[in-house]
Structures are given as C-alpha cells and as structure tokens.
Amino acid sequence: MNSFCHPVDCGINHETPRFIEGTEELSGDAGLALRMRGISESVLEARLQRLLRRQRFEEAEALAESFKLSMQDLHKVREFKCQHSHAKKS
C-alpha cells in the first residue's frame, strides 16, 4: 500500500470498498498519478452467502447462475423468508 491512500465513499456499492492512492509512477507532466482501487470478495461461495444474509436475492441468483454455483442455499433462504413473513401476518 502506498503512503498516500485514502478511502472513498462512492455511495454506489458498499460491497466493494474503494480507495484512492498515489502512485510513484510519473504520469505525463503531472509527476504523480492517482489510481482508484477496490476490494472485493474473491471466494464466490462466501460472496453468495453474504448476499443471502443481506437478502439480496436477485444479485445472489445472478451470481450463482453466472458461475454455476449451487442454487440450493438461495432456495432455502427464500423459502424461510417467505414462511417467516406469512407467520408474522397470521
């Protein structure tokens, strides 16, 4: 990590924290370049579980379909949520 590194609140996606850092590389006439970086979950199963815990089912389903992950957990969590919401209404 560079000595010039500051977190950035993009307000777009809190799943991927972003930060700006200065680079030692010369950038044309400027002398110092800035670069924006992000940190994301690289273990797909862990990312899927986090989406399910946050009840972000559409994103979880898209991730599972894209990477051919098991849909079993997705179906279980959706079913539990559905049963739980019906029980509250009764």
Image (tube, rainbow, N blue to C red):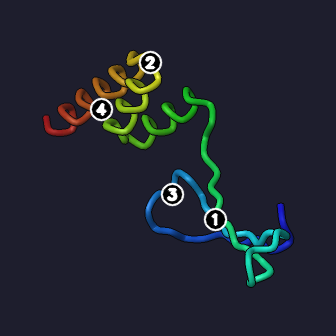
In space, the residues marked 3 and 1 are separated at their CA atoms by 15 Å
Q: Is residue 60 above or below residue 8?
A: above
For marks 1 and 4, the one nearer the N-term is: 1
Percent x, y of residue 20: 67, 69
Please tell me which residue is depicted at 60% across the width and 58% down the height of the picture: 17
Q: Nearer the viewer, residue 90 or 42?
A: 42
Q: Amino acid at mark 2?
A: Lys
The residue that disc 1 covers is 36
Please tell me which residue is depicted at 44% across the width and 18% down the height of the picture: 68
73 to the left or right of 78: right
Percent x, y of residue 9: 55, 70
In space, the residues marked 2 and 3 are separated at their CA atoms by 25 Å
27 to the left or right of 67: right
In space, the residues marked 1 and 4 are separated at their CA atoms by 38 Å
For marks 2 and 3, the one nearer the N-term is: 3
Q: Nearer the viewer, residue 67 or 78?
A: 67
The residue that disc 2 covers is 68
**Front of the two marks 1 and 4:** 1
Secondary structure of residue under mark 2: loop
Name the disc covering residue 14, or none. Answer: 3
**Front of the two marks 1 and 2:** 1
Which image quadrant: the C terminus? top left
